[in-house]
Amino acid sequence: MFDIQLGKDIHYIGVDDKTLDLFEGQYVIPNGISYNSYVISDEKIAVMDTADKRVSKEWFANLRKVLGARLPDYLVILHMEPDHAANVAEFLRAYPTAKVVSNTKSFNLLQQFFNDIDLSGRSIEVKDGDELALGEHILRFVAAPMVHWPEVMFAYDQKAKVLFSADAFGKFGALDCDEDWACEARRYYFNIVGKYGAQVQNVLKKAALMDIQKIFPLHGPMLTENLDYYLGKYNLWSAYQPEDKGVFIAYVSIYGHTESAVLQLKKMLTSAGIKTVASDLAREDMAEALEDAFRYDRLVLACVTHDAGLMPQMENFLLQLRDRNYQNRKVALIENGSWAPIAAKKMREILEPCKNLTFLENKLTIKSALKPADLPQLEALAKELAVV
């Protein structure tokens, strides 16, 4: 267990997992993940969420170490996803006098996830604005539906001025991983929470009314200073506004001809002093590509026409962008085709429902391979992209 000083009465009992290869069965986590859990020790003891079944043994050992001879009074469930709630039933068996504190939706989900759970006389149902007194520490519950499950709550410790934020403000990576917060928090946000920007905006408005001095999420480091930075990032991300000025090029190439055009465009833009990032969707992490698409204010899509449609990696990428409410960006299109190039039309059709996208006038159509005659059109595209 990490010896993390969270305050006199708040203890960390979470566990790092460095053996899991895919988070939620799809996101690559080369630096692992942390399952955070906390104990508030006062006149009453509250355990804040549990952990994934992969680390049950370690989590219970950490809990027993912090409890010592005392018994917990409450298990507070802020989020019912199994990476945080897998040990609820075992906790209740181990501590038969403890009560579960959560909301209606969580109690319904408990019955779905566990076959043998009996909460008769052991449940305390709370809703937005309700409080739970532990002694000097008083928890105020904040409904945060769809950030990113419907039952999600935050809890604000009014004495310690700590916001227990469920999955919000979390990131990929184990706690002992020394890396920049924003990169993996951004990838985490846009892939897991990104669809629910409006709901995040709603809960940020509630948070603005609190004197928050620390944020304790269920994944990633506890945030104890410079909170304006983290809150600012979440406000920007959930408003779907570009974080940085630059061009992200997402492409799929079969024989290298489309890639050749992408690399030439990247060289033109870089020479003009424009930050440019390119990603081969067939080879690079899709979650990373989605993160970069939301990070920058301009997007270039380059794809080969394939079976009268799109390469599957590009189609998947665009559908995920649309599903996450991609908006407020400039978009340029590059297509390739040997006899019937229609990739640009297909890419645009997928993104048409997105709000406030500006499709550039210049479009590049490659017939099999980029030729000298195509360069003026590529240069015109680069010039239009250079206009901020």
Image: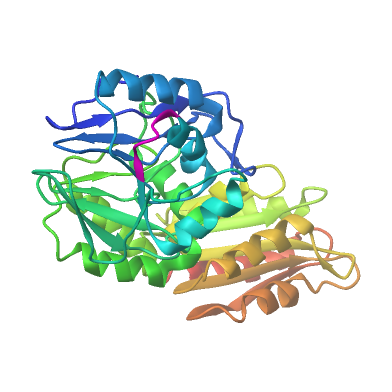
Q: Quadrant of residue 378?
A: bottom right
Answer left or right for 370 relative to 326.
right
Which SS does the magenta portion mostly show? loop
Q: Is residue 170 or residue 35 the one in the foreground?
A: 35
Find residue 27 and report its image quarter.
top right
* Foreground of the two, 307 or 191: 191
Q: How is the image coloured?
A: rainbow
Where residue 177 appears, as percent x and y from the top left, is: 39, 26
Please report the bounds of the magenta region as a residue range: 94-99
On-image quarter of the C terminus: bottom left
Q: Is residue 60 visible?
A: yes
Q: Position of residue 61 (x, y in %)?
A: 40, 19
Spot occupied by residue 21 in the image (x, y as percentages of width and height): 61, 31
Residue 217 vs residue 193: left or right?
A: left
Q: On the rendered structure, is 279 left or right of 79?
A: right
Instruction: Tell me, yes or no, whether the highlighted magenta stretch contains residue 96.
Output: yes
Residue located at (37% from left, 29% from top): 14
Report the residue that reaches farthest toward the front: 121
The foreground one among 260 and 347 is 347
The residue at the point 34 percent across, 39 percent down is 98
**Residue at image point 88% right, 65% down:** 338
Where in the figure is residue 189, as x and y percent of width and height?
44, 53
Q: Is residue 240 visible?
A: no
Question: Which of the pair 370/126 is nearer the observer?
Answer: 126
Count of numbered marks: 0
Q: Quadrant of the N terminus?
A: top left
